[in-house]
Image: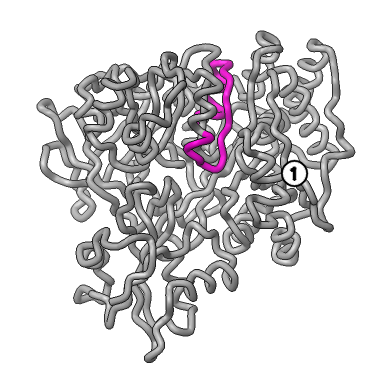
């Protein structure tokens, strides 16, 4: 499925930004060059989490696993442009599925393990997915049984493949597709036959990932091989990931942050990646202790904990870990300075979205650590040169959201907009959303607010968000979606949702509610309503409740979210707040 217009493909190819190499080509090269090198390793706690036995696979062993999945897809009549949905925790089997799809032309749409029927039904309907790959359980939740329970609402779905112990009735397994054992040359030749037969190109869509904006429904972001390769190159450049590096990746393997590292940077450098899920600081540190690591990524709150509790790192050899990526929340200046002075580790500050709008503040471009914590290079603007390879491929501009005027001076806040080969071509089967996402000159409107800083006006500084979302632990939550669901509760007359600051997660979800009648709802009632009656992902549920007599509004009736944030602030712990 090629969604990028032909004129755009020709332009990017002529400029040397896009090529004909696919992820399948890269994978076959890795097998041939380093068949016995360790490629991927499961989280050590995978069995406790999902009933899946942890495995470590070399490149050639992973090749056999990819062949197993490719044969399974073919046996089910799935080929180029068909869609499968995958809901697994971080594991080596995900690598096999991504690569099997890269070879066969099947499109994989990965979804977070937290998603429930509310999100799943919409995603399957939008993609017309024919097959679901689901963990039997995640933690104590019977995920596969949840899919079976809602099969009537998933008419395009032909089967559910379950990974893990105790698969429920109504699902199938891979038991009939044992992992083949072929000689190296035969394995490479057999795998190479799949893209030849399917006619897969580097312009074909490989993934459809999901994001939340102000809309109530999840938005699908399709990305082809070329788009992903450029994103992988940005990670390699900023993190200085070397050939054959060892990486530890604790981010979900379902969106930009996880895939760009666990799949793209890994594949492009022939690295070894140790997966991690769900985030657990003790497990993370133990993995660092057992596997000397060259590159990793972690949320600012995790880096802060490592500095505040240095005894946890007793016996951990960090001599190879020269850089660690972070982002998703503001980075304190002291944190970036402390990691360098205490451990000799430089922190790379990332900003980005599934749509491909990304900025990297790395030491080679921003050596001043205080600046690196606060600023991003003003890439894609004439007159500035930066070292990262993608900086000369994209164009950015800051636009006044009211007047549409392009801002070029310091002190004015505007919306950051992107254009270029890293940016997606539009939301999956959603032309109205796509039209609203781009301006008249083809720039993607991020909804993120920045201003211009630096003595030479060479930096962007993040100010806030134009779009009404909460970012909790790196996951985007549409406030409009949660508000619409809460309004269905019999005790709720009106509801507004805002994010309140949280040291560990960046933000938590706070519901501001006007009660219907004299019996106001309790927080536990709202959460139970969302999770049990609406089958909503747990991370979207409010963790704070504020009861008010009325919501503040402007003369046109719009709820003043800024006023609510100022009134409520970050007061209180993650629990119910009464008026």
Q: Where does the magenta region start and end?
A: 260-283
Residue 119 image offset from top left, x and y in percent: 57, 59
Q: Is residue 272 magenta?
A: yes
Which residue is more in the foreground, 315 or 359?
A: 315
Q: Quadrant of residue 118?
A: bottom right
Q: Position of residue 308 (x, y in %)?
A: 32, 35
Residue drawn at 72 percent across, 54 percent down: 144
**Residue found farthest to the top:** 33
- Judging by the rendered image, the residue that carries numbered circle 1 is 163
172 sits left or right of 552 in the view:
right
Q: Is residue 388 visible?
A: yes
The N terminus lies in quadrant: top right
Disc 1 is placed on an element classified as strand
Which image quadrant is residue 43 in? top right
Question: Where does residue 517 sit, x and y in percent of width and height?
Answer: 38, 91
Dot 1 crowding, Cα within 10 Å, few <14, some 14–19, many 20+: many
Q: Please name whichever residue, 315 or 119, is drawn nearer the observer in this view of the structure.
A: 315
């Amino acid at each position: 499925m090629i969604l990028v217009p032909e004129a755009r493909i020709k332009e990017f190819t002529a400029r040397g930004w896009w090529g004909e190499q696919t992820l399948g080509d890269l994978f076959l090269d890795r097998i041939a060059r380093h068949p016995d090198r360790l490629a991927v390793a499961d989280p050590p706690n995978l069995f406790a989490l999902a009933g899946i036995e942890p495995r470590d696979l070399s490149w050639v062993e992973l090749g056999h696993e990819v062949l197993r999945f490719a044969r399974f897809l073919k046996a089910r009549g799935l080929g180029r442009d068909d869609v499968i949905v995958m809901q697994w925790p971080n594991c080596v089997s995900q690598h096999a599925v991504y690569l099997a799809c890269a070879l066969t032309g099947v499109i994989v749409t990965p979804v977070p393990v937290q998603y429930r029927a509310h999100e799943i039904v919409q995603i399957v309907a939008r993609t017309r997915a024919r097959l679901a790959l689901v963990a039997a359980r995640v933690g104590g939740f019977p995920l596969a049984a949840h899919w079976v329970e809602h099969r009537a609402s998933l008419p395009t779905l032909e089967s559910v493949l379950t990974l893990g112990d105790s698969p429920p009735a109504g699902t199938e397994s891979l038991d009939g597709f044992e992992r083949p054992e072929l000689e190296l040359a035969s394995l490479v030749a057999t795998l190479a036959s799949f893209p030849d037969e399917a006619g897969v190109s580097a312009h074909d869509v490989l993934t459809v990932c999901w994001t939340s904006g102000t809309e109530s429904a999840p938005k699908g972001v399709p990305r082809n091989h070329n788009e992903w390769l450029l994103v992988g190159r940005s990670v390699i450049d900023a993190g200085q990931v070397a050939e054959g590096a060892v990486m530890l990746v604790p981010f979900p393997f379902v969106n930009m942050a996880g895939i760009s590292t666990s799949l793209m940077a890994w594949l492009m450098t022939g690295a070894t990646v140790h997966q991690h899920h769900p985030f657990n600081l003790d497990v993370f540190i133990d993995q660092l202790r057992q596997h000397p690591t060259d590159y990793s990524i972690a949320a600012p709150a995790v880096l802060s904990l490592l500095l505040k509790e240095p005894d946890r790192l007793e016996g951990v050899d960090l001599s190879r870990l020269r850089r660690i990526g972070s982002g998703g929340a503001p980075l304190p200046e002291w944190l970036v300075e402390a990691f360098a002075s205490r451990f000799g580790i430089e922190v790379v500050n990332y900003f980005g979205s599934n749509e491909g709008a990304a900025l990297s503040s790395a030491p080679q471009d921003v050596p001043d650590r205080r600046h690196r914590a606060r600023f991003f290079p003003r890439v894609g603007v004439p007159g500035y040169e930066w070292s990262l390879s993608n900086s000369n491929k994209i164009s950015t501009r800051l636009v006044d959201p009211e007047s549409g005027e392009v801002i070029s001076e310091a002190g004015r806040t505007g919306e950051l907009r992107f254009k270029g080969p890293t940016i997606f071509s539009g939301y999956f089967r959603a032309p109205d959303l796509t039209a609203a996402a781009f301006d008249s000159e083809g720039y993607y409107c991020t909804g993120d607010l920045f201003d211009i800083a630096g003595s030479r006006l060479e930096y962007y500084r993040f100010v806030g968000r134009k779009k009404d979302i909460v970012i909790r632990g790196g996951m985007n939550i549409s406030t409009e979606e949660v508000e619409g669901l809460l309004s269905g509760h019999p005790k709720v007359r009106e509801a507004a949702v805002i994010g309140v600051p949280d040291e560990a997660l960046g933000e938590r979800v706070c519901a501001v509610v006007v009660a219907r009648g004299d019996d106001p709802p309790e927080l536990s009632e709202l959460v139970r309503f969302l999770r049990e009656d609406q089958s909503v992902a747990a991370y979207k549920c409010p963790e704070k409740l504020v009861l008010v007599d009325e919501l503040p509004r402007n003369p046109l009736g719009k709820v003043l979210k800024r006023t609510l944030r100022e009134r409520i602030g970050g007061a209180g712990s993650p629990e119910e707040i009464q008026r």
